[in-house]
Amino acid sequence: MKKGTFFCIDAHTCGNPVRLVTSGHPELEGETMGEKRIHFLKEFDWIRKGLMFEPRGHDMMSGAFLYPPCSKDSDAAILFIETSGCLPMCGHGTIGAITAGLEAGLIQGKESGKLKIDVPAGQINVEYQITDKKVDWVKIFNIASYLVHQNLKINVPDLGEITLDIAYGGNFYAIIEPQKNYPGLESFSPEKILKYSPKIRDIAGKAVKCIHPEDPKVNGLSHVLWTGKPQKEGSSAANAVFYGDKAIDRSPCGTGTSARMAQLFTKGLLKQNQEFVHESIIGSQFVGCIEQVTEVSGITAIMPSIRGWAQVTGNNQIIIDDDDPYASGFQL
Ligand code: PYC
């Protein structure tokens, strides 16, 4: 039977939604969040579909469940849910879930202003600041991020040849910079992003392998990051990230910013400790930084941090009942 009542705190991180589910969690098997993610996808995907898709959600909806920690030294664990599945890591999702969880008293760190969180992609450190019971900002220290492929040339129907790089920042990103057939974000409409991104993801994803060398459960080209000139003072660069079937991230995208910093670092265009302010399609900003340089199975990698903010927008009690023909949602 697919039935349940889910209490949720709805929030947004720099414009992109985060639905923090605070009750109705299924019991998940596995020692790590990576293993629990696989169990959730196999047995409980109806919960994700019901909470993310229309009529309870929408194309951009994304969310998170808080779980008890898996590692001895962690304070909590997060399982990410969204219309496309369960991401190994989600930056805006973490910032939103931590903000909503702290403000509701659902997360208590061992150390003031600091947390360790288990996510399917590994363990991350988090720092935050609270004033008058409201979280001002959350800074996530993301997992090792690296450039995977450079100068891949593909032929995109109706658009022509596109050259792209692929980088990992918790998810695999095709990164497209201005070139002959792409003038840059400022002259490329959201409709075009939605039209061409699935084709590019499909063609590039078939042309090259994207598998994390240390965790093969993390695989597949899932996101397309279009770059451009920033519109706001203080921004280093602008981006629009396509994910799922129809979504453009309204936030500057945490894992996308990590992947972009890894790409720029490897190409000698960004230095360790240099601030990188990434602007989203709606002009909101994340502050990124390369904290350390490391390696992943012999590949040069960076340890990025991302600082951003989130706002709680409401409390929601959502019912999924299989008497409803749209219990698992739908997509146009
Ligand atoms: O912030 O990492 C992120 C993200 C991934 C997809 C949407 N947002």
Image (tube, helix red, strand yellow):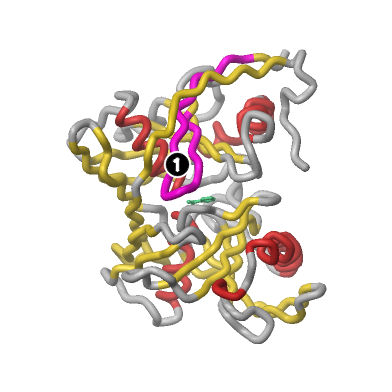
The picture places residue 184, in percent across and down from the top left corner, at 57, 77
Q: Is residue 111 above or below residue 193?
A: above
Query: Main SS of the magenta segment?
Result: strand
Q: Which SS class for mark 1?
A: strand
> Image check: 155 left or right of 13?
right
Q: Which residue is mark 1?
A: 12
Residue shown at 48% from the left, 25% from the top: 8
Disc 1 residue type (three-letter): His
**Is residue 328 visible in this depiction of the protein?**
yes
In the rendered structure, does residue 17 fall within the stretch colored magenta? yes
Which stretch appears magenta? Answer: 4-20
Query: In the rendered image, which quarter is residue 327 located in?
Result: top right
Query: In the rendered image, which quarter is residue 82 located in?
Result: top right
**Is residue 149 visible in this depiction of the protein?**
no
Q: Is residue 75 above or below residue 242?
A: above
The picture places residue 18, in percent across and down from the top left corner, at 48, 38
> Image check: 210 left or right of 304?
right
